[in-house]
Amino acid sequence: MTIQLGIPRIPAKGGGGLPMPPSRPAGVPVGLADRFGRQATDLRLSVIDKCNLRCTYCMPAQGLEWLSKQSLMTLDEIVRVVGVSVEKLAVRELRLTGGEPLVRPDLVDIIRALRQRHPSLPMSMTTNGVGLDKKAQALKDAGLTRINVSLDSLHEETFELLTRRPFLTKVLAGVKAASAAGLGPVKINAVLMRGINDVEASGLLRWALEHKYELRFIEQMPLDADHGWTRRDMITAAEIRELLSQDFVLTPDLRERAGAPAERFQVRKRNAGGGTQGPVLGTVGIIASVTEPFCGDCRRTRITAEGRLMSCLFSSEEFDLLSLMRSGADDEELARLWQDAMWIKPRAHGMDHPGLDSPDFKQSGRSMSAIGG
Ligand code: SAM
Ligand code: SF4
């Protein structure tokens, strides 16, 4: 298959006469079940691979060819894919992502069309927030339920170092507008990078608590286009808890996690003597995908912007749902391919081993931006 600048594309299977996944055995449950007893009910759908930032942990400084317009799923194709997932495969939740979803010109129309077909489907979106100030109200009016904004630093220089673009002010305006438009509770996703923004752990939490945003720290995963991730350099969940504990007391929030990737903590201020002081100020989440993985309870299924099915962020196989659709397949055939693809979902991603030399772990050929995080 094509090799693109920075990111080799993985050969796709499924549509257009290409190989298909093996069929699941007869008699297994309806929906998107796999061999390990998990059921995927949460769809992550990328609407575009293109992005207007270049976060160091995701994209290369330059290069990375974008998909052509013809390779992207159209509005109608997205609506059909989501329809199949909800109406035939028991998907119960949708998250739109990218690349940067706000870069797609017909994003509001896509959301409106999805909402018309699925009046009560929880539909959220992950965005870098650039341009969100101008679109937040339209997104809400079109039917978006909630929003996650990625923000790793509150300092312009650090923000620019991480994203390679000087857009902190725009992102902050976007977060504010999302909250005002009723897209809350706004969740903030932050990735900490050693020696760059790890000193901001407490500052980010203080800011989020003050504005009533829900902050979630995400462990850096080996999904960067440059393949520069190392276990030694990544900031672990244990370190994040340690960093936050200098200023806050964290108590595990014992509410049912229900497949959510973030482990949540109630947050109280730490007083000068080291004890707690005052009431619970809010919560913070930590997504420990690498060091404390939650694969055993994973409920995700993924579709890339060009309509490839992925059962896991680290799947080495992907299946071409879009080509199958474009070849004239009916909804039953699409659903069957999806079920077969999910049936062979790996037990785990294998990152929870001490080294990348683990036989279980293979870095994905795609960057996070090309999958849809
Ligand atoms: N562009 C949008 C954004 O940044 O929110 C949506 C797509 S982005 C790929 C989705 C999420 O993936 C972001 O919160 C980003 O921080 C996270 N992400 C990207 N690369 C990552 C990596 N290597 N490890 C952990 N999280 C990553
Ligand atoms: Fe773009 Fe999001 Fe990747 Fe940053 S994390 S480069 S904003 S896709």
Image (cartoon, rainbow, N blue to C red):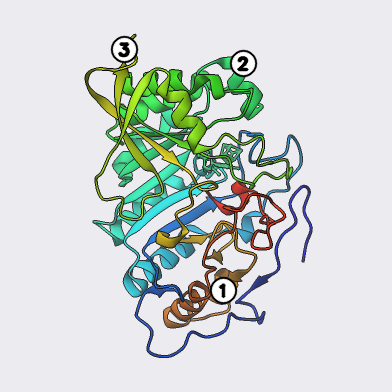
Q: Earlier in the sequence, mark 2 or mark 1?
A: 2
Amino acid at pointer 1:
Arg
Mark 2 touching mark 1, by CB under 8 A? Answer: no
The residue mark sitting in front, 3 or 1, is 3
Q: Residues within 10 Å of mark 1 (few under 14, many from 20)?
A: few
Amino acid at pointer 3:
Asn
Q: Earlier in the sequence, mark 3 or mark 1?
A: 3
The answer to whether residue 323 of the structure is visible from this angle is yes
* Marks 3 and 1, how far apart at CA: 62 Å
The residue mark sitting in front, 2 or 1, is 2
Can you identify the residue that label 2 sits on? Answer: 157
Q: Quadrant of the N terminus?
A: bottom right
Give the structural element (helix, strand or loop) at label 2.
Answer: helix
Instruction: Specify the quarter for ligand 2.
Output: top right
Amino acid at pointer 2:
Glu
Q: Position of residue 370 (x, y in %)?
A: 62, 51
The residue located at (26%, 43%) in the rendering is: 254
* Marks 2 and 1, how far apart at CA: 46 Å
Quarter holding residue 156? top right
The residue located at (46%, 55%) in the rendering is: 44
Residue 326's disc is: 1
Front residue (pair 58, 344): 344
Q: Residues within 10 Å of mark 3 (few under 14, many from 20)?
A: some
Give the structural element (helix, strand or loop) at label 3.
Answer: loop
Q: Position of residue 212 (x, y in %)?
A: 29, 25
Residue 313's disc is: none
Residue 271's disc is: 3
Q: Earlier in the sequence, mark 3 or mark 2?
A: 2
Q: Position of residue 191 (x, y in %)?
A: 53, 34
Left or right placement of residue 363 versus residue 262 in this view? right
